[in-house]
C-alpha cells in the first residue's frame, strides 16, 4: 500500500496542527514515527499492523512523509526537533506540547473508533511518549520502541523516563489496574541504556514487559549499531529476534484491543 492510499486529516490541539495519515479497519493503533518522520519502513510497519486487523493513524509531526531516512535528512530533522518548543528534547521531564497534542489526538481517535481504547506505538524520538499517553484513559496498549528521550547524557538522564515522580506514579497506577506497558530495545544501543528499562521495571513491576534483543548478534545479522527494532532493523526471516519482537507487539495489541 502506497502512502497515497492513506486518507489525510488535519488535527489541531494546544496551538499545534499536524496532518494525520489514516487507513485500515479494526481497533486503532496510533503510530508516532521516529526521526526523520514517516519513512518507507514506518509505512511498512503500519501496513503490517493493518494486515493484522488494526486501523492505523500516523501523525506527521516532523520531516517529509514517504522520504527515505538519509543521514542528512535525519540530522536536519533532529536538529529542528531538538530546538523546537513542541518537543523539549533535552528536558528530563515530560513538559512537551507534543505529548499534549498526541493525547488530544488519542482522545479523538478513541471517540471515533469506540471500543475499550486504542493502542500507541512510539519509536526512538517518540518512543517514551507512550508513558505520557497513559496520563489519559484513551490509550490502553502502549508500546515504547527504543525510547531515546531524554537523551542519555549523564547518569540522571540514562535512567530517566521523561516523567516526573507524580506522573510516573500515575502511570504505575494505571499499569497496576491492567494497562501493561511493552518496551523494546537492542542491548547494545547507547541511546536506550539498560538503566532506563531498569527504572521502568522498578516503577511498574511485572506490568512492564521489557523485550531486549541481543546486539551485536552476528548470527542474526544484528550489528552493534542496531537501533530501530520495528522498522530499519526488522527482518521477516522466521525465527529472527526482530520478527519475534514484532509478533510480540501484535499479540500485545491484539490481547488488549481485541480482548484475545
Image (cartoon, rainbow, N blue to C red):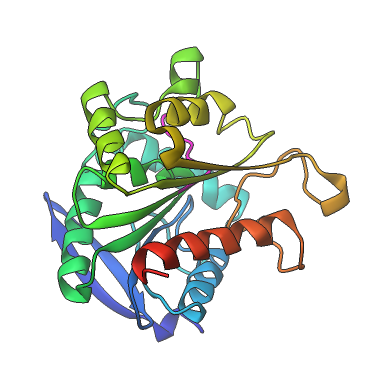
Residue 8 figure quarter: bottom left
- Res 119 seen here: yes
Q: Describe residue 234's horizontal placement relative to residue 200 as left or right.
A: right
* 215 falls in the magenta region: no
Image coordinates of residue 51 in percent, x first then y, are: 51, 81
Image coordinates of residue 254 in percent, x first then y, are: 43, 68
Q: Nearer the viewer, residue 84 or 2?
A: 2
Image coordinates of residue 185 in percent, x first then y, are: 59, 42
Q: What main secondary structure does the magenta stretch of the protein show?
A: loop
Residue drawn 44% across the image and 45% down it: 127
Q: Describe residue 124's horizontal placement relative to residue 222 as left or right.
A: left
In the rendered image, the vertical position of residue 127 relative to residue 247, given as above or below:
above
Residue drawn 78% across the image and 44% down it: 223
Image coordinates of residue 16 in percent, x first then y, are: 17, 53
Q: Magenta segment range?
A: 144-150
Residue drawn 23% across the image and 59% down it: 106
Amino acid at each position: 500500500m502506497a502512502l497515497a492510499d492513506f486518507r489525510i486529516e488535519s488535527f489541531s490541539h494546544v496551538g499545534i496542527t499536524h496532518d494525520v495519515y489514516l487507513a485500515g479497519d479494526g481497533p486503532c493503533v496510533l503510530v508516532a514515527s521516529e526521526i526523520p518522520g514517516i519513512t518507507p519502513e514506518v509505512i511498512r510497519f503500519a501496513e503490517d499492523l493493518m494486515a493484522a486487523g488494526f486501523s492505523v493513524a500516523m501523525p506527521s509531526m516532523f520531516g517529509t512523509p514517504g522520504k527515505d531516512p538519509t543521514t542528512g535528512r535525519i540530522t536536519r530533522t533532529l536538529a529542528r526537533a531538538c530546538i523546537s518548543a513542541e518537543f523539549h528534547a533535552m528536558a528530563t521531564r515530560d513538559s512537551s506540547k507534543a505529548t499534549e497534542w498526541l493525547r488530544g489526538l488519542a482522545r479523538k481517535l478513541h471517540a471515533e473508533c469506540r471500543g475499550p481504547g486504542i493502542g500507541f506505538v512510539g519509536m526512538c524520538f517518540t518512543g517514551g511518549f507512550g508513558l505520557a499517553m497513559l496520563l489519559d484513559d484513551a490509550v490502553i496498549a502502549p508500546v515504547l520502541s527504543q525510547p531515546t528521550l531524554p537523551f542519555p547524557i549523564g547518569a540522571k538522564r540514562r535512567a530517566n523516563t521523561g516523567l516526573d515522580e507524580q506522573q510516573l506514579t500515575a502511570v504505575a497506577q494505571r499499569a497496576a489496574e491492567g494497562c501493561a506497558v511493552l518496551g523494546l530495545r537492542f542491548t547494545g544501543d547507547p541511546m536506550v541504556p539498560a538503566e532506563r528499562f531498569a527504572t521502568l521495571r522498578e516503577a511498574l513491576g511485572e506490568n512492564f514487559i521489557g523485550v531486549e534483543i541481543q546486539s551485536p548478534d552476528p548470527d542474526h545479522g544484528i550489528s552493534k549499531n542496531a537501533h530501530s527494532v520495528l522498522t530499519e532493523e526488522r527482518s521477516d526471516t522466521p525465527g529472527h529476534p526482530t520478527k519475534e519482537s514484532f509478533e510480540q507487539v501484535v499479540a500485545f495489541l491484539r490481547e488488549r484491543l481485541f480482548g484475545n
